[in-house]
């Protein structure tokens, strides 16, 4: 039986994906085979010897020690796209709030709570409503930085609102390119996009190359008075540089899901408390996706949506399977298969993939492999771990 340790509150629909006959799921499981979490901060000390996988019910894995997991041969999963619609809808709300002073209007009406005469209330409202006038989104331009699962949904929704959509993503995948509406105008570089966009929305992952992407230099390329939306990650935007751009009018408004002290009281800033994936549907989608990936990996060795291991899928041929993780250096697979050949073990099917410094192999054999053979593979130079299971 596989043991799954959970951290945080995981949606019941996700937990139900683990059958009680094959999985023991609890928040205090000792020496688990897998960990399922949301925002809990995992440390290298949490990586027990029996741990095979960590699944984050969400897209970012900043709270998971990915490098330590890789070194230990632990697969780290995330759930890209599972909360995409939830974030997209919040971005649409942000676009509207940035264009129409709905928040200011609501606050003004609340300030009239001591006015009990309806005629006087209407007079005050009619006299002051011009203070909260805005502009329509139709006909305006939206620059979408990052055209993955969320960015492509935002682009499509903006087109439906009558906006011109500009897109930039140098690392766009084939799948993402297929999802992207043909009406989106692809830009060759960020300065060109910033110079043409009335609104800019960020949908890139937090990586060393994206941290501080919006800084003093890039902000100089923004169209004066444009609106910046950040529902990706806070460190992508340099808060100090942005405050200066807001103060001098280079940026007209900033709407984001990540409050920082420098901006919480700025009059041109609207901040929400990290609500992007805070819908019942998104939490369920992430939990189900993470659980399904763990089940598939633990039962078959197949890997989908890992941030540190290659994507690998091999249809079970029946019989037994060996999963071997090794350092990505030449000759290791030959050594592993030689161990099997020396023992007259026939390989029915196999697949080998690599990612960075890690290689991962699934080897299907006709008969169960004895412990001495598994140990011989495990002792092979540069092999990190070995798993065996019937399929």
Image: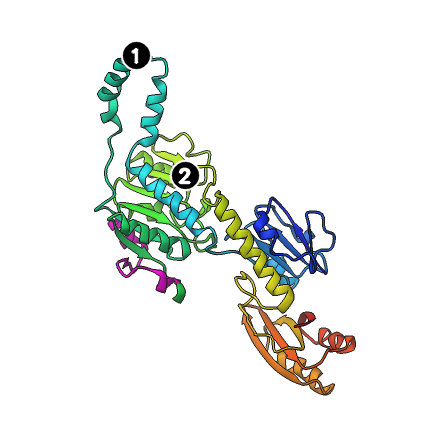
Picture quarter containing residue 348? bottom right
Q: Judging from the image, what secondary structure is the residue with disc 1 in?
A: loop
Q: Which residues are magenta?
A: 176-197
Query: Left of 371 or right of it: where is 271?
Result: left
Quarter of the image with the N terminus in it: bottom right
Assess whether residue 186 is covered by the magenta stretch.
yes
Which label sits on residue 240? 2
Dot 2: element = helix
- Residue 173 seen in this snapshot: no
Query: Horizontal and vertical percent for residue 117?
Result: 30, 12
Q: Tell me residue 266's x, y (percent).
A: 38, 31
Question: Measured along the vertical axis of the image, is residue 231 above or below residue 22?
Answer: above
Residue at 33%, 36% (x, y): give it. 97
Q: Earlier in the sequence, mark 2 or mark 1?
A: 1
**Which residue appears at 29% of the width and 15% of the height?**
118
Q: Write the residue at 41% across / 39% down.
A: 240
Q: According to the image, label 1 marks what residue?
A: 117
Whether residue 239 is visible to the viewer of this picture, yes or no, is yes
Q: Is residue 277 left or right of residue 302?
A: left
Give the Cα distance between marks 2 and 1.
46 Å
């Amino acid at each position: 039986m596989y043991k799954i340790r959970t951290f945080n509150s995981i949606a019941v629909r996700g937990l139900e994906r683990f059958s009680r006959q094959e999985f023991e799921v609890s928040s205090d499981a000792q020496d688990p085979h897998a960990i399922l979490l949301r925002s809990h901060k995992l440390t290298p000390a949490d990586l027990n010897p029996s741990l095979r996988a960590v699944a984050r019910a969400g897209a970012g894995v900043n709270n998971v020690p990915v490098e330590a997991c890789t070194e230990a041969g632990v697969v780290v999963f995330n759930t890209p796209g599972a909360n995409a619609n939830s974030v997209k809808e919040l971005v649409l709300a942000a676009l509207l709030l940035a264009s129409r002073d709905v928040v200011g209007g609501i606050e003004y009406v609340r300030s009239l709570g001591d006015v009990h005469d309806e005629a006087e209330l209407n007079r005050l409202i009619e006299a002051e409503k011009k203070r909260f006038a805005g502009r329509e989104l139709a006909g305006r331009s939206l620059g979408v930085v990052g055209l993955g699962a969320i960015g492509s949904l935002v682009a499509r929704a903006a087109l439906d609102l009558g906006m011109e959509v500009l897109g930039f993503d140098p690392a766009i995948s084939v799948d993402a390119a297929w999802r992207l509406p043909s009406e989106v105008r692809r830009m060759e570089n960020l300065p060109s996009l910033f110079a043409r966009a009335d609104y800019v929305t960020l949908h890139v992952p937090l990586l060393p190359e994206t941290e501080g992407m919006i800084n003093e230099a890039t902000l100089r390329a923004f169209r004066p008075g444009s609106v910046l939306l950040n529902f990706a990650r806070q460190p992508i935007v340099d808060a100090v540089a942005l405050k200066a751009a807001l103060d001098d009018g280079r940026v007209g408004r900033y709407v984001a899901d990540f409050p920082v002290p420098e901006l919480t009281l700025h009059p041109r800033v609207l901040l929400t408390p990290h609500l992007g994936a805070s819908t019942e549907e998104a939490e369920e989608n992430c939990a189900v996706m993470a659980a399904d990936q763990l089940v598939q990996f633990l039962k078959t060795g197949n890997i989908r949506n890992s941030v540190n291991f290659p994507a690998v899928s091999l249809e079970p041929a029946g019989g037994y399977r060996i999963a071997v993780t090794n350092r990505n250096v030449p000759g290791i697979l030959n050594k592993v298969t030689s161990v099997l050949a020396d023992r007259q073990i026939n390989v029915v099917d196999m697949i080998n993939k690599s990612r960075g410094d890690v290689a991962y192999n699934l080897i299907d054999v006709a008969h169960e492999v004895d412990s001495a053979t598994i140990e011989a593979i495990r002792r092979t130079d540069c092999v990190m771990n070995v798993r065996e299971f019937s399929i």
